[in-house]
Image (tube, grey):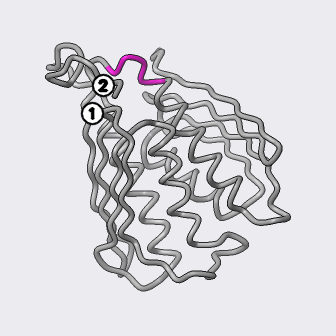
Amino acid sequence: MSDRTGSVTRTTKETSIAVSIGLDGSGVLDVETPLPFLTHMVEQIAKHGLFDLRVRATGDVAIDGHHTTEDLGFVLGQSVAQALGDKAKIARYGWSTLPMDEARVSCALDLGGRPFFVWQVPLPHGAKLGTWDVELAEVFFEAFARGAACNLHVTLEAGSNLHHIVEISFKSFAKALMLATRLEPRAGGIPSTKGTLSD
């Protein structure tokens, strides 16, 4: 069994988030959040990234979904970073372009230890998918980039249906993360000429 697992719990006055992830899993998922559409999107990460993922999230959704979405993205990123350990022999880079009907999104990711986020997915302010504000997709991924200390770019190439655009953003991210976290058998140690991926 793989020991590339991470488990992080974070509790504030606004949210309580617990995430456990196994990078070398088969897509086994157990996700509970108070926001059904967010739950559905996080399930996409597990299923299409082949990560074993358990999530328990509660938060002040009576106000809105921002804090819960942001904190879940952040803790998921921290869990991935923990599971990667010193990052020896990982591929480090991952990228994916996926379609969903008329929508197409590209995601590129570098687990090199330098948090940076680029979001080129224009979404209408104030639109909702279920009870979830669509602009929270950007919030989730930005928080993941901070938590994982990674460079993450998400770009919309085509699309008009909001559900399709957001869902394929999560699926493309899942595939890119799967590639970036995979072990490269030919690699010898840390995948950097600096000898470290900590900053």
- Image quadrant assignment for residue 31: top right
> Residue 171, how many percent across, how many down?
43, 57
Near-viewer residue (70 or 186): 70
Where is residue 186 drawn, in percent x and y? 14, 20
Q: Secondary structure at mark 2?
A: loop
Please name the residue that numbered disc 2 is placed on: 197
Q: Is residue 85 magenta?
A: yes
Task: Name the amino acid, label 1.
Answer: Arg
Give yes or no for contact between labels 1 and 2 (Cβ–Cβ under 8 Å).
Answer: yes
| Badge number at residue 35 | none
The kind of secondary structure the magenta stretch mainly shows is loop
Query: Does residue 106 appear to the left or right of 59 in the view shown?
Result: left
**Residue drawn at 48 percent across, 78 percent down:** 123
* Residue at horizontal 37 percent and vertical 81 percent from the top: 159
Q: Earlier in the sequence, mark 1 or mark 2?
A: 1
- Report x, y in % for residue 71: 65, 46
Residue at the spot 64% in from the left edge and 28% down from the top edge = 8
In percent of the image, x 45 and y 17: which residue is there? 2
Q: In what element is the residue under mark 1?
A: loop
Q: From what the image shows, is residue 67 above or below residue 56?
A: below
Which disc is residue 92 wearing?
Answer: 1
Q: Which residues are magenta?
A: 83-87
User: Against 135, is 195 above or below?
Assistant: above
